[in-house]
Amino acid sequence: MLETVLIGLAIFSIVKIIIFIKLSDIFLSKKVKNDNDNIIEISDDVQIDESTKYKRDYFK
């Protein structure tokens, strides 16, 4: 009797973890927007300081 309860709890916890992962993928997925208004085109002549490069790469 105890073994069936432990097996049932193990199966229940595994199923619960799988459901949690699937729901978090659905609701917490990062939506990628292709927003061309925020893209800054820089010619080769312009020097970019390190903070601007970091901000540009970090907030992509």
Image (spheres, rainbow, N blue to C red):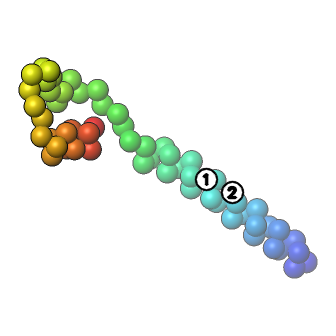
Residue 40 position within the rendered picture, expressed as x and y whole percent measured from the top left:
14, 27
The answer to which image quadrant residue 10 occupies is: bottom right
| Mark 1: amino acid | Ile
Residue 1 position within the rendered picture, expressed as x and y whole percent measured from the top left:
91, 77
Neighbours of disc 1 within 10 Å: few (<14), some (14-19), many (20+): few
Residue 26 position within the rendered picture, expressed as x and y whole percent measured from the top left:
48, 44
Secondary element at image label 2:
helix
Residue 14 position within the rendered picture, expressed as x and y whole percent measured from the top left:
70, 60
Separation of disc 2 and disc 1 at Cα? 6 Å
User: Disc 2 designates what residue?
Assistant: 15
Q: Nearer the viewer, residue 43 or 17?
A: 43
- Going by the image, does 59 lie left or right of 2? left
Residue occupying image coordinates x 56% and y 52%: 21
- Going by the image, does 17 lie left or right of 32? right
Secondary element at image label 1:
helix
The answer to which image quadrant residue 12 occupies is: bottom right
The answer, for residue 18, to whether it is visible in the render is: yes
| Mark 2: amino acid | Val
- Going by the image, does 3 lie left or right of 57? right
- Going by the image, does 46 lie left or right of 9? left
Residue occupying image coordinates x 80% and y 67%: 8
Neighbours of disc 2 within 10 Å: few (<14), some (14-19), many (20+): few
User: Disc 1 designates what residue?
Assistant: 19
The answer to which image quadrant residue 59 occupies is: top left
Q: Nearer the viewer, residue 12 or 54?
A: 54
Q: Nearer the viewer, residue 43 or 6?
A: 43
Residue 20 drawn above or below residue 55: below
Tag 2 near tag 1, CB within 8 Å = yes
